[in-house]
Amino acid sequence: MIVAGNWKMFDGPDPRALRAALGDLPHVVAPPYTRLRECVEAGLTTYAQNVHWENEGAFTGEISAPMLQSLGVTGAIVGHSERRLYFGETDLGVARRAHAALGAGLAVIACVGETWEQRESGDTETVLRVQVESVRDLCGTHDNLVIAYEPVWAIGTGKTATPDLAQDAHAFIKSLLDLPVLYGGSVKPDNAAELLAQPDVDGALVGGASLDIDSFVAICRAGS
Ligand code: PEP
C-alpha cells in the first residue's frame, strides 16, 4: 500500500516535522523541485512531480532522471492531469517519461483519469484504455511502476469518487495492465479508509490533504 503526497506548486510542510510525525509509516512525498534536497535529507521517501525522457539537453524547464538521482530522489510522478491539461502533455510523452525514468532506476507513478465530460458521455473506459495502453506499450509491467487512477473531476474539487466507482475503474485498469493502482482525487482523512478498503485500491495519491502534516499522517495510517 503506497500513500503518496503531491505538494504541487506549494512549499508544503516542514520536511523534518513531517518525517518525525510519520514515524515508521510508509509514505512518499513529491514536493516542488526546490524542496527535494530538504525532503531527502530529512529522510523522507522523495519523488519528483515530473521527469524528462532525456538525460540532458536543450529542454528548458525540464529535469532528468540522473539529475533527480543525484539529489537522492527515488521516484517520479508522470502524467498528472494538471500536466496534461495546462502544459499539453500527451499520452506518448507521458509514456516516454515513464519509460526513461524506469530505465534509469526511478520508481514511477503514472497518472490516468477521465474528465467529467468524458464520464458523462460514457467514454471513461475508452479514455482509460488509451492512457493505460500507451504506458503499457512502452513500459510493460515493470516492478517499479504503479498507476494512479485520478478522475480529473475529483482532483482538488472536494468531489471524491465513491468507493464502488473507484473499485470499478481500478479493476478495469488492472485488466489492461496488471500493476498496483493508487486512487487520487480529494482523498481526506475521513474518506481514506473506505477507499483504501476496496480490493483493487492499492494506495492513494493525495494532493491538498498532503500539505497538512496531521491529515497526511492520518491518511498514511489508514493505508498501513
Ligand atoms: C493530486 O494532486 O494528485 C490530487 C489528487 O489532488 P487532491 O487530493 O487535492 O484532489
Image: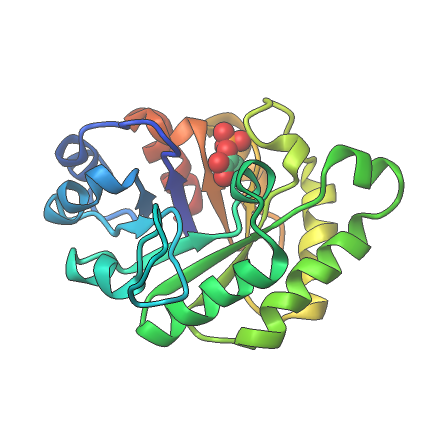
Seen from the viewer's position, the closer of residues 91 and 201 is 91
What residue occupies the far left of the structure in this picture?
41
Residue 187, visible in the rendered structure: no
Please state the horizontal and vertical placement of residue 173, each as a whole percent of the image. Answer: 68, 61
Please state the horizontal and vertical placement of residue 181, each as a whole percent of the image. Answer: 56, 57
Q: Residue at x 43, y 46 (%)?
A: 223
Q: Relative to residue 25, is residue 19 drawn left or right?
A: left
The image quadrant that residue 85 belongs to is top right
Q: Which quarter of the rendering shows the N terminus?
A: bottom left
Seen from the viewer's position, the closer of residues 138 and 151 is 138
Seen from the viewer's position, the closer of residues 31 and 221 is 31
**Up/down of 124 relative to 96, above or below:** above
Seen from the viewer's position, the closer of residues 88 and 132 is 88
Q: Residue at x 50, y 67 (%)?
A: 96
Number of numbered markers: 0
**Up/down of 63 relative to 39, above or below:** below
The image quadrant that residue 130 belongs to is bottom right
Residue 51, visible in the rendered structure: yes
**Up/down of 61 relative to 54, above or below:** above
The image quadrant that residue 54 belongs to is bottom left
Please state the horizontal and vertical placement of residue 66, each as a whole percent of the image. Answer: 24, 66
Q: Residue at x 74, y 61 (%)?
A: 129
Please state the horizontal and vertical placement of residue 205, each as a whole percent of the image. Answer: 47, 43
